Image (cartoon, rainbow, N blue to C red):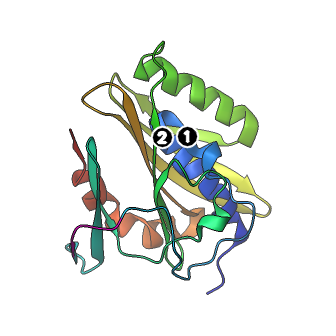
Amino acid sequence: MKKPRAIIISILILAALAVAGIGLAKFYFTKQANSEPADSTVKPPVKADEFSNGQPYLIYKDENFEIKYPNWPNINPANIASPATMKVAVINAGCSFAVNSSLLPADMNFYDYTRELVKRQAVQYKFTLIEQNIGATKAYFIVEIPAGADVVKNVSYAYLSKNQKQTYGVAFAANKDIYDTACQPVVDEVIASIKLY
């Protein structure tokens, strides 16, 4: 199955809406990503196992955050505009998944920072905000991104670490018409696995 360029380019909004609301501009693809394994800046997983549907997973963990994510091929770092903030970037035949991290500016709280990021991203990428819920330490977004004749559905989550300094974005993206079969089967377990330290 050919991976539509729309999904790859829209992944840019994926982790962006994911990092503290929208670090996804940082995840803008300059070339069509491929799903072949590649050396990357992603930290090595600490364990492999399976979600309840049989999908193998890996674990990303740092001093503030932990998440189980699908064991899919890495997106080639050459196709990521800001690989330094990207912690995980993987893709399967229809769904892209990313984890992004950045420092919360010292002069802002998570809520205000996230709202500002969403506003800037909406103008820059002209997405349609379907749903949003921004709280003091976490946020949730569903957006639809026009990409040529396609529409990409992006579901993103953002979190503030317990030390109130680090933001993490988690995002799933796929063509809208296949999101429910390509991404949704792992979303709930991935999100339920998140631990903040």
Q: Are the residues at dot 2 and dot 1 in contact (C-beta closer than 8 Å)?
A: yes
* Camera-nearest residue between 41 and 192: 41
* Residue 87: percent from left, percent from top: 44, 55
Q: Residue 23 carries which label?
A: 1
Q: Categorize mark 2 by other alpha carbons within 10 Å: few (<14), some (14-19), many (20+).
A: many
Measuring 43% from the left and 21% from the top, which residue is drawn there?
Answer: 111
Q: Which SS class for mark 1?
A: helix
**Mark-to-mark CA distance, 2 and 1:** 4 Å
* Residue 6: percent from left, percent from top: 70, 64
Q: Which SS class for mark 2?
A: helix
The quarter of the displayed image where residue 122 is located: top right
Confirm whether the magenta stretch covers residue 163: no
* Residue 163: percent from left, percent from top: 26, 27
Confirm whether the magenta stretch covers residue 45: yes
* Camera-nearest residue between 92 and 181: 92
Magenta range: 44-48
What residue is pinned by disc 2?
19
13 over 166 or under it: above or below = below
Measuring 29% from the left and 49% from the top, which residue is drawn there?
Answer: 62
Name the quarter where the N terminus is drawn.
Answer: bottom right
* Residue 155: percent from left, percent from top: 48, 50
Amino acid beneath label 2: Val
Is residue 71 in view? yes
Amino acid beneath label 1: Gly
